[in-house]
Every structure is written in C-alpha cells, then in structure tokens.
Amino acid sequence: MCYNISYLTKKKLKYARRFGNNEADIKDLEEQLKKLGENIGPRYHTSGFDHPDVPVITNENRNKIQLFNWGLIPEWIKDVRKAVELSNRTLNARGEEMFEKPSFRRAAKYRRCLVLVDGYFEYHWKNGKSYPYHIALKNDEPMALAGLWETWHLESEELIRNTFSIVTTSANPLMAHIHNKPKGSMEPRMPLIIPRELEDEWLKPISDPLDLDEIKSIIKPYDEGEMHSWTVPKIKGKEAVGNVPKAIEKVTYPELESNQGELF
C-alpha cells in the first residue's frame, strides 16, 4: 500500500521541467510551485492519515498544479462524520477493483489525476521489527503516482474540499522484497507509478469500452530497474524524526545484515 510519501523536496524547476510540455509550461508551472511552496513548504515525510494537501495534476486542468487533500470523499457523502471516517479508508484505491467499488468507480472513469511526489516509504519486517525504506527513481526525477479525485461539497456546512486517493497495484520484485508483511492476507503492493509516456492516457476520460481497456492496461507494476531504495530513520513512534531532511537520508541497521541499504 502507500500511506507515507515525500514531496516538494526537490527544486521547483525540476518539477516544472518534468511536467511541463514546453518552455511556456515550464515557466508557468515553476511559478505555480513557488506559490504552493510558500503555503506548505517541503514534505520530507508525511502520512496519509494526517490528510495532507499534496500537489496533483487533474484531467480537467493539465496545465495547473493544485493542492488536493489526501483521502478521497465521494460527492454523495452528506455527513461530516462519515466523510472523516471514509477518508481514512480511501487513502489508497486498488487498481484492480476501482471500477467496481462505490467510493471509487465514478472517479475511476472520469476523474483521474497525477499525484506528484519525490518518493514514498514502505516497511520491511525482520524478527518482529519493522524498518522503513524510502523508494525513489534512479534518475532523481519526481514521480507521477496514479490518483483518483473528487470534489466534495457539503452545502449545509459550506464545506468544499478537493480530495484524492492513490491507486495501487501488485508489487514488482523490489517492492515484494521490501513489503514482506502486507496487511492481512493481501499480497505485497506498491503505488501505481505512471511512466511519462502514459500520463496522457491515464488522464484521458473514458468514453467507450476501448478507453476502459487502455486504462486497465496501465495498471501494472513499475519497472524495478528504474527504482532504488534505502533504509531511513524511524518515521513513526517516539523515535520519529519528523518532517526534516533527515527523514529521507540513508541510515544503517546492522540487524538487517545482507538486507541492509539499497536493493536492486
């Protein structure tokens, strides 16, 4: 699954170049990111259960980076308490099930987005203890994670919130090794990372069955050869380092022995 991420820790120009299509786009996106950064700053580690605002690009506005709240709330939820409860269960959407699940199926068809992150965290277990890894791309570029989004509007409370969920898929060999103790009886998972050449396809609305097949074909593990991982300091509990650069710095855990450090 994917409940912990880092974002906006890289230079704004790197984000702008990654998601802009031409010089005008790059300049505009860099200005957008500067303004967003003034509001939230870099996030070296944040948990989905804190429902942070995260940069996204939606299918309705591909030239704009916006901040959406993590934890999707469908428009048909009409109660604040239920909205809060549901948002804790919709941090992730299983790609294989999102077209059938009531909370996700409309967004899966018509409201998809790219969630812009620098990397994400996952736990590896050994001898009853957990060790956090940070996972990023080898080329040091930002990641585009597949997302679903909704705008929740509760007129009685005058509340409007743009929300999203990160889509997950089965784990590649790298993530299967790290994520060796998935919750319950589930198989190891990972966030669905969208390759640059498929971003337009992911954002395209579905108008016929062929479009649906194309979207489903994108839902697969990312090439582990383009990823790398390393162990980092504790990110939760009393020893958690918090939202500081150290959160994504490599540390050594001798007890991991041959499993230590970067994999693949």
Image: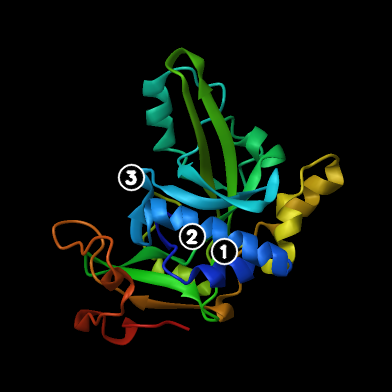
Does dot 2 land on a helix, a strand or a loop? helix
Q: Is residue 245 above or below residue 52?
A: below
Does dot 1 land on a helix, a strand or a loop? helix
Horizontal and vertical percent position of residue 209 = 84, 42
Horizontal and vertical percent position of residue 235 = 26, 62
Total count of labels: 3
Gap in angstroms between the C-alphas marked 1 and 2: 6 Å
For residue 78, say whether it is visible. yes
Looking at numbered disc 2 in the image, what kind of residue is underneath it? Answer: Lys
Q: Nearer the viewer, mark 3 or mark 1?
A: 1
The furthest residue to the bottom: 258
Looking at numbered disc 1 in the image, what kind of residue is underneath it? Answer: Glu
Q: Quadrant of residue 261?
A: bottom left
The furthest residue to the left: 238
Closer to the camera in the image, 80 or 159: 159
Q: Is residue 11 left or right of residue 219?
A: left
Q: Which residue is mark 3?
A: 50
Residue that appears at 39% across and 47% down: 52
Label 1, residues with CA under 10 Å away: few <14, some 14-19, many ≥20: many
Specify the label residue 34 is tagged with. 2
Q: Which residue is mark 1?
A: 30
Residue that appears at 76% across and 43% down: 205
Looking at numbered disc 3 in the image, what kind of residue is underneath it? Answer: Asp
Q: Are marks 1 and 2 in contact (CB under 8 Å)?
A: yes
Q: Earlier in the sequence, mark 3 or mark 2?
A: 2
For residue 183, say whether it is visible. no
Horizontal and vertical percent position of residue 18 = 62, 69
Q: Is residue 246 left or right of residue 156?
A: left
Gap in angstroms between the C-alphas marked 3 and 1: 27 Å
Gap in angstroms between the C-alphas marked 3 and 2: 23 Å
Residue that appears at 50% across and 37% down: 72
Does dot 3 land on a helix, a strand or a loop? helix
